[in-house]
Image: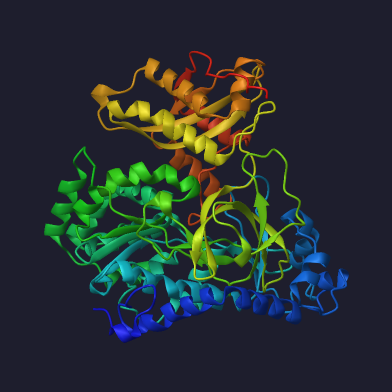
Amino acid sequence: MAVDSVLSSPLGPPACEKDVKALQFIEEMTRNADAVQQRVLDEILTRNSQTEYLKRFKLDGVTDRETFKSIIPVVTYEDLQPEIQRIANGDRSPILSAHPISEFLTSSGTSAGERKLMPTIKEELDRRQLLYSLLMPVMNLYVPGLDKGKGLYFLFIKSETKTPGGLLARPVLTSYYKSEHFKSRPHDPYNVYTSPNETILCSDSFQSMYTQMLCGLYEREQVLRLGAVFASGLVRAIRFLQLHWEQLAHDIRTGTLNTLITNSSVCESMGKIMKPNPELADFVANECCKENWEGIITRIWPKTKYLDVIVTGAMAQYIPTLDYYSGGLPKACTMYAASECYFGLNLNPMCKPSEVSYTIMPNMGYFEFLPHDPTSTTTSSPTNLVDLVDVEVGKEYELVITTYAGLYRYRVGDILRVTGFHNSAPQFHFVRRKNVLLSIDSDKTDEAELQRAVENASKLLREFNTSVVEYTSYADTKTIPGHYVIYWELLMKDLNNSPSDEVLNQCCLAMEESLNTVYRQGRVACNSIGPLEIRVVKNGTFEELMDYAISRGASINQYKVPRCVNFAPILELLDSRVMSRHFSPSLPQWTPERRR
């Protein structure tokens, strides 16, 4: 029940008195965004004034924005690699940060080349925890009664590695889940998980997934929301249930744990939960043995109000699959974060996925924005950056950050579009990660464009009750001319009405029609690009791709299917699972632009 209106926030009446402070904090930060930004920059530059990096540019303790921008260069990870490598190798001098580097946070492991190592300091955990603490007070404004049940969240850790100098290197979520902030978090009736900490903190992904799913089944009547970090993680959990429901039902029926679960902490925690429940076992078996899994989430967890997953950017691909499994439940994207820094939160988390915008919290770091013109072939000069409060609605920018941990004017690589403001703090729609995915000649196809092409082509599959559940791509330059190869994994809900070869050939053409004019010119006028090819792979292929990535160091929490691949072993895996190949049957439409 909402507290008295006298305590109401401009965001809405808080659900409880505990939420009042959080909502007031959001209002205070966003109303004074520019002043907060100046304070943050002042704090970062003052405390780090004697670092080797800042002394190199002779900043001499000055903290005003104009001097900072005129002296300190805008950089990429490659620019900082020598300094980061020295820290990784054991140099403890104040190179980037006056505070000791406590560990490195790694990128997801799916980017080209080696995983990036992002330096961090202990107090950054406090900042991350602060942002986490704001999520439920906002969600409570939109979804009442979340204190009356639990959340079934599939959360995982990755076993960490150590750098030559002895510092831990691990994904940001592993760092958070293994911290006391998470393990010793105070009880919050609005944010209770079905999974015991021990199941989340188990480094064996099978044992972790199995026991988290088992807990979710035992508490099916208590579950009010399902979640994972990315949409792909929740899809993977449902597929896991499809593969293992018989054993899970057996465990519930007998009250005994699968002998494949050997982690002692997990076994001990599950021992407190498990008891024979033949009625629940029968229910799980009866639901899961059905061929039709449409709406399986609400069939098994009937009180579910929403799915808590990221479905923006490349994760938008999973929306149809999640709609199928959940019966169209709302999908809440609550926060925007990266290994480098946590940025902000969604103040309207129950909006449609296409309308998700994140409000940047100005206390998290110092933010600048490099104007990005999506129609231009040239890169913006890194000298004309815009401050947080000066961005313009409708325009796109590349995010540049300065952090307490020692990143200065660092290009994150995310392209954001300004959708509006909350008070004086801008709100952004995540457009895509920077950098081109596919190129054969002078054509340049990025992730958003490829996603759009897949969506348009997949419309041809609807009458066959078929959808694209996963995809990736490859620029095949071994053929002359080179051509785009798109790997599709399909979900066919009616095997008696599957799409024909001709339909899939037309999907190739539909994709080409959706691509940019430079691509189509290369196909039609220049003959520099060959017909687009779709290779349909066996079901489960992308599961194998993920397992392979995890075996090479990717984090199960942060794993995202790469939308373009060029690593030979991955291509070999994909090609070994191909069931059929299809090519564009004709040229796409293209006409020269009219000269004026």
Closest to the observer: 346 or 264?
A: 346
The x, y position of residue 169, in whole percent, is 63, 64
Q: Residue at x 57, y 26 (%)?
A: 484
The x, y position of residue 300, in whole percent, is 21, 54
Would residue 252 be visible to someone looking at this image? yes
- Quadrant of image for the N terminus: bottom left
- Locate residue 399: give its quadrant: bottom right
The x, y position of residue 162, in whole percent, is 66, 64
Q: Identify whether 451 is placed above or below 340.
A: above
Left or right: where 313 falls relative to 67: left
Q: Residue at x 58, y 73 (%)?
A: 33
Q: Residue at x 20, y 61 (%)?
A: 303
Q: Residue furthest left?
A: 279
Would residue 157 be visible to someone looking at this image? no
The x, y position of residue 558, in whole percent, is 51, 55
Q: Identify whether 209 is placed above or below 568.
A: below
